[in-house]
Image (cartoon, rainbow, N blue to C red):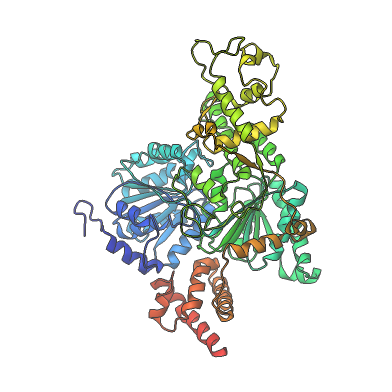
Amino acid sequence: MTDNATGNVTGSAAALDALRRYFGYDSFRPGQSGLVDAILSGRDVLGVMPTGAGKSVCYQIPAMLLRGVTVVVSPLISLMRDQVDGLNDAGIPAAFVNTTQSGDEQSMVLAQAARGDVKLLYVAPERLETDRFRSFAAHTPISLVAVDEAHCVSQWGQDFRSSYLGIGEFIAALPSRPIVAAFTATATERVRRDIVHILGLRDPMVAVTGFDRENLYFDVIKLETKRKASWVAGYVAAHPDESGIVYCATRKETEALAESLNRVVPALRGASAGAAQAAGPVAVAYHGGMAPDVRERAQRDFVTDRVPVVVATNAFGMGIDKSNVRYVIHHNMPESIEAYYQEAGRAGRDGEPSRCTLLWNESDIVTRRRLLDNDYENERLTPEEQEVVRMSKRRLLDGMIGYCRTTDCLHLYMTRYFGETAPLIGRDGTPGGKCVGGCANCDSTFETIDVTDTARAISRCVHDVMYDWDDQNRPSRAPMRAGLGSGKIVAVLRGSRAQDVLSRGLDRCPSYGRLRETPEARIRDVLSQMTTDGLLFVSEGRLPVVGFGVRAAETVAPDFRYEIKRVERKERASRRAGEAGTGGSAMATAGAALGSFTPDDEGDEALFQRLRALRRDIAQEIGKPPYIVFSDKTLRDMARVKPTDDEEFLSVNGVGESKLRQYGERFMQAIAEFDGQQ
């Protein structure tokens, strides 16, 4: 039907038809249709969906059905070309305006958009503040403003960007307010509130789809720093046909590790020096300190599959559309669960089984805390406000430390962190049990330590320090205290004789000295894990205090039992292999357990490889990344269906009308030739 006020086409039928025509899918993924329908009905939306869940479709389909231009605010200009190329390849008129273009080129694109020849216009947030773009926006009907990576607007998110704060002002200044749609993969409840407030969303439909990525296998390995490079090299060597990202904490580490992989991996594969040189590099480094042209070439080589591995800082990857990344390895522990979820989520965007491995040790924690304390400045905030944000970042880091040490299912830990309370459905189809995607914890590749007594003592201490106590350890009738910070809790339990402990009478608490024989580090670990698990709660503000969490009552139950992960792993043959430089063997074994693609027969796999080669040839001819032609998932479906005519080719998952016109004949010819050789 048609909205008479706006002339906009609404309704699921039109959206579904557009989905089939442009993207070749018969149905929307969970969460997409509700957001699309809300936008088409003229309502603001906030979509919180995991990486790979199809956030972009939620504004791309409405853009083709709404009457005016859709402005897409995207944070990284280096990714805009690939996004626009992919849309144009699907038959959707899209363009971008950014600093890589000359003034004349920018004017030409804006003129095309003003004429209606461009339906989606991608811009960086800084572009909205320029006189040229504001003039364009004032004279061009803008039906929708889509804000990608919307968590960047919040100072409580892991990727705050001050340029995002001007988006709301830009929207408010438009002569006619458009629909506003915000999308992110990582947003806690607090960040969601910030997005709604700062962008000025009006009564938005908020859709938070499940955060679980069932095609990802999560693993956490505690490893000495000196052994990490060998482990990564072993894994890369054992997966020669796979594309991967390795994240490092510093620029120096990215360059050193990339150089190491290029030297060691060919040798592990048995290649001679000459053959290795002819084959080209295994890995490229990527970080913000590189010259722009070098950085752009590194990204292009990775995205186009010329180089299988990129070793990068967190400057790489936000919004990257490369769908066939089969593994993401973190060489160091990230600063938050939000950051890890986003970075690890770049694996398996096509829905195929992929792996996310985190290598960490205690020195990573020290490094992260140092970076956090020394590297946070924001001119928009007062020193007091900066300290509040810094404390918030410390709590985010505590959540990441908890992920490394938890004994719970890693999928469950992640979803619970983002506020999902429903139990995950296990591999047997019932709530609980081993997770579908698979993780190291559910596969029991670690040992645990029973810390029940320590946890009970900490919980009791949190209670005790809220009261004044007399010499007979009896609570006085004085008003309750607000509580103490985690450091003071540890000091009381350890029986500290520090002046600030004694002067406040904390040595009279019943809990004083109760864990005198327990190492301070162990108490801190347990307290941190209890906070992560909801047994305790740490308040916000400049002087955060420890209180009781939503699960606090469990600690006084007779059957309460609490464990944390032993930080050293069991000695296993796979670990010894890692020390020898062939650590990929352990991951290959676990990779089989997570359900990597298993073809129906060898012919399907051989045809898939033939189609991959054709895709690579076509991509080189047109100068675009291979995944823009077809994803791995589409090629696998093509190998299964073996289409022989247009109708069958359109039935392949991910093939739309534009793709059929451009590539159908060549792929069907390759399939026919392959069948003729069998």
Looking at the image, the residue that sits furthest to the bottom is 676
* View extreme (front): residue: 558
Query: What is the tally of numbered marks visible in this picture?
Result: 0
Which residue is at the far left? 4
526 horizontally vs 640: left or right:
right
Asked if one can make out residue 91 in the rendered structure from this viewpoint, the answer is no
Residue at x-position 36% and y-position 59%: 61
Q: Quadrant of residue 308?
A: bottom right
Tell me, yes or no, if residue 25 can be seen here. yes
Could you tell me residue 605's position as x and y percent?
57, 77
| Picture residue at 25% right of the left edge, 58% below the top | 9
Q: Residue at x 61, y 12 (%)?
A: 504
Q: Nearer the viewer, residue 97 or 620?
A: 620
Looking at the image, which residue is at 65% across and 38% down? 368
Residue situated in front as seen by the camera: 442 or 398: 442
In this view, the residue in front, 547 or 668, is 547
Q: Position of residue 62 (x, y in %)?
A: 33, 57
Along the line of sight, the residue nearer the viewer: 74 or 152: 152
Question: Above or below — where is 374 with respect to 92?
Answer: above
Residue 507 against residue 242 in the figure, above or below = above
The reply, left or right, for residue 417 in relation to residue 300 is: left
> Where does the image place residue 335, in percent across and percent down from the top left?
60, 41
Looking at the image, is 587 positioned above or below residue 598?
above
Position in image of residue 218 (x %, y %)? 59, 54
| Quarter containing the N terminus | bottom left
Quadrant placement of the C terminus: bottom right
